[in-house]
């Protein structure tokens, strides 16, 4: 018997990872006043790549949602 992981399971894990990421960002925000200038500069350099990854993630979610809606529609006998 093959052990298969569903999209729903994977997306639940992604949600948990994003919640953890949000926690880290809030933690940074709370500590920013005490940040050393060099470390603040290094942290600032991380923002643009993080924004790019968020954009990629959003694009992937839009694409996945369209595909899942098409599957959902076929299951009900509708065409997308």
Image (tube, rainbow, N blue to C red):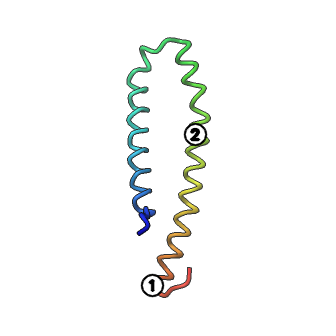
Instruction: Mark 1: give few (<14), some (14-19) or many (20+) Cα within 10 Å.
Output: few
Distance from Cα at disc 2 to Cα at disc 1: 37 Å
Q: Which residue is at a point 47% across and 76% down the rendered structure image?
A: 72
Q: Which residue is at a point 43% across and 61% down the rendered structure image?
A: 5
**Pointer 2: what residue?**
51
Which of pointers 2 and 1 indicates the residue nearer the eye?
1
| Image quadrant occupied by the C terminus | bottom right
x%, y% of residue 46? 58, 29
x%, y% of residue 25? 43, 32
Disc 1 element: loop
Q: Is residue 66 above or below residue 45?
A: below
In this rendered view, identify the residue nearer to me: 47 or 1. 1
**Pointer 1: what residue?**
76
Q: Is residue 70 left or right of residue 33?
A: right
| Image quadrant occupied by the N terminus | bottom left
Q: Which residue is at a point 60% across and 26% down the rendered structure image?
A: 45
Q: Dividing the picture into quarters, in which one does residue 54 lie? A: top right
Instruction: Check the image and name the residue furthest to the bottom.
Output: 77
């Amino acid at each position: 018997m093959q052990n298969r992981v569903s999209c729903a399971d994977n997306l639940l894990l992604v949600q948990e990872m994003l919640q953890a990421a949000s926690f880290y960002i809030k933690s940074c925000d709370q500590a920013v006043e005490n940040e050393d200038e060099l470390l603040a500069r290094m942290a600032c350099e991380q923002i643009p790549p993080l924004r790019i990854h968020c954009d990629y993630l959003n694009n992937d979610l839009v694409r996945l949602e369209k595909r899942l809606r098409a599957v959902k529609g076929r299951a009900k006998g509708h065409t997308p």
